Image: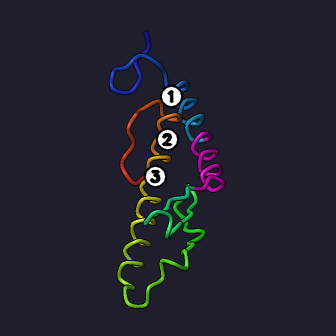
Amino acid sequence: MAKGFGGMPGNMANLMKQAQKMQKGMEQMQEQLDQKTIETTSGGGAVKVVITGKKVLQQIKINPEAVDPDDVEMLEDLIVTAVNEALRQAEEMVTNEMSKITGGVGLPGGLF
């Protein structure tokens, strides 16, 4: 039996095929992430944000009733909360999609 990297069975050709398949899958995933959106709200719907799977902020909607000139800080907090939740969900979506491509093999954090 031929030995591959780290003494594992296999050969370089199979390893290259797997790497190419994984690369193609990642390219497709990146394209799909640009099309997917995540919508989150805070303050019972007072603030809504929409971001893409690539973590690009597309929209912020603020319910006019949430605008209190005497309490701008609350509105700012609601916006931060909604954006952070959207980013967390986007990161979770990327991680789930990556695990489908890599078969659960962990890649260094922040790679995508």
Q: Is residue 17 above or below residue 43?
A: above
Q: Which residue is mark 1?
A: 15
Q: Which residue is mark 3?
A: 89
Q: Are marks 2 and 3 in contact (CB under 8 Å)?
A: no
Dot 2 lies on which element?
helix
For the record, the magenta segment spans: 24-37
Q: Residue at x 62, y 41 (%)?
A: 24
Residue lying furthest top: 1
Q: CA distance from mark 2 to mark 3?
A: 14 Å
Mark 1 or 3: the one toward you? 3
Say how the picture is coloured.
Answer: rainbow
Residue lying furthest front: 65
Q: Quadrant of residue 88?
A: bottom left
Is 34 magenta? The answer is: yes
Decide: few, some or many residues near mark 1? Use Cα within 10 Å; few <14, some 14-19, many ≥20: few
Q: Residue at x 55, y 58 (%)?
A: 39
Residue kind at label 1, given as amino acid type: Leu
Q: Which residue is mark 2?
A: 98
Q: CA distance from mark 1 to mark 3?
A: 33 Å
Q: CA distance from mark 2 to mark 1?
A: 19 Å
Q: Residue at x 37, y 19 (%)?
A: 8
User: Would residue 61 be visible to someone looking at this image?
Assistant: yes
Residue 68 location (% of width, % of height): 44, 85
Q: Would you say the magenta stretch is mainly helix, strand or loop? A: helix
In the figure, is residue 88 to the left or right of 63? left
Residue 103 location (% of width, % of height): 47, 30
